Image (tube, rainbow, N blue to C red):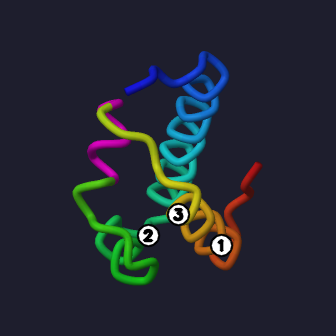
Amino acid sequence: MPRPSKETALEKERDRLNAVKILKALDKKGIARFAVSKATKIGYPLFWNWEQGKYSPSQKNLKKLKRFARAHGTEVN
């Protein structure tokens, strides 16, 4: 199996950091991770995995998270 290109690895890391930043901003607003998980249908354990650097969010999950954050007044890049 070919190794991902450096650019792809950088993009995944950027997406992971962006997701973690959004989750922290939602935390500051008092929105529980469980509520985010339920509303977005993103598995709750994935949030922890993203924070620990084990996985990066899929584009689909990142879009869901951004949409949720915008709907709750959180600024998203």
Q: Residue at x 55, y 35 (%)?
A: 12
The stretch of residues the image draws in magenta is 47-53
- Choose mark 1 or mark 2, whichever is in front: 1
Q: Amino acid at mark 2?
A: Ile
Most common SS among magenta residues: helix
Q: Which residue is pictured at 29% across the width and 72% down the height?
A: 34
Left or right relative to 33: residue 12 = right
Question: What number is the disc on residue 29?
Answer: 3
Residue 41 spot, x, y in % from top left: 38, 79
Which residue is denoted by mark 1 in the rendering?
A: 67
Q: Residue at x 77, y 48 (%)?
A: 77
- Write down the quadrant of residue 45 in the picture: bottom left
Query: Picture coordinates of residue 52 (x, y %)?
Result: 30, 32
Cα distance in 3D space between marks 3 and 1: 16 Å
- The dot on residue 31 is 2
Report the residue at 58% width, 56% height from top.
59
The N terminus lies in quadrant? top left
Give the residue type at disc 3: Lys
Q: CA distance from mark 1 to mark 2?
A: 14 Å
Residue 31 image offset from top left, x and y in percent: 44, 69
Describe the element under mark 2 as helix, strand or loop: loop
Q: Residues within 10 Å of mark 1 (few under 14, many from 20)?
A: some
Q: Is 76 left, or right, of 59 in this rendering?
A: right
Q: Secondary structure at mark 1?
A: helix
Front-most of residues 13 and 67 = 13
Label 3 Cα crowd, 10 Å radius (few <14 / some 14-19 / many 20+) = few
The verdict on residue 54 being magenta is no
Does the magenta-highlighted stretch encompass residue 50?
yes
Circle 3: element type:
loop
Mark closer to the chain start, 1 or 2: 2
Against 66, is 58 above or below? above
Sequence order check, earlier mark of 3 and 1: 3
